[in-house]
Image (cartoon, rainbow, N blue to C red):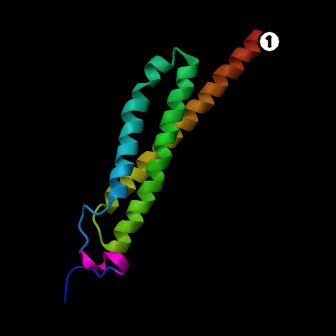
Amino acid sequence: MSATPSVRGSDAARAPTARDNPAARVRVYAVVFAAFVGGGGYVPAALFLPLTVAWTAVILLSGLPAIVTGHVARRRAVRRGLGGRWLALAGIAGGWVCVLVALLAAAALVGVVGGLAVLIGS
């Protein structure tokens, strides 16, 4: 009896390995991109409003693929017996943190623009 789980379909000819989970790499890249590139951009972006909008969009658009590919990687790891389940969960959590930061930044941006509109209107 083999210790390797059986795999149906076209993947039956090869045994699963820890490297067969490409969705795990994609979500890690998305979270790292959002954290380093997007997070570091808020310092100069605070001085220039359109740049703040752009960096908020970058973080949001990086967090969403991290969430989706994290779920894909976690399901693939469970179904095929691959490694990386906890890393996939970390990617899902990191993606949700990126989305939360982007939503908070968007709310702050709306507040600043609304406050300026009130000041200019009075």
At x 33%, y 57%, the residue is 22
Q: Residue at x 32, y 79 (%)?
A: 7
Q: Tell me, yes or no, if residue 6 can be seen here.
A: yes
x and y percent of residue 98 in the render?
Answer: 47, 41
Quadrant position of the N terminus in the picture: bottom left
Residue 100: image location, x then y, percent: 52, 41
Query: Which corner quadrant of the image does residue 69 belong to?
Result: bottom left
Amino acid at circle 1: Gly
Q: Is residue 96 visible?
A: no
**Can residue 23 be found in the magenta stretch?**
no
Identify the image quadrant of residue 8. bottom left
- Which residue is farthest bottom? 1
* Residue holding disc 1: 121
Magenta segment's dominant SS is helix
Image vertical order of residue 103 relative to residue 18, above or below: above
41 relative position to 104: left or right: left
Give residue 83's position: percent from left, percent from top. 27, 64
Residue at image position (42%, 30%) is 39
Q: Is residue 44 left or right of residue 19?
A: right
Residue 116 lies, in percent from the top left, at 69, 15
Viewer-proximal residue among 10 and 91: 10
Vertical placement of 81 versus 88: above or below?
below
What residue do we see at 67% from left, 21% from top?
113
Q: Magenta stretch: give its range.
A: 8-14
Q: Is residue 47 above or below residue 6?
A: above
Q: Is 17 left or right of 29, judged from the image as shown?
A: left
Callout 1 secondary element? helix
User: In terms of image quadrants, where is residue 29?
Assistant: top left
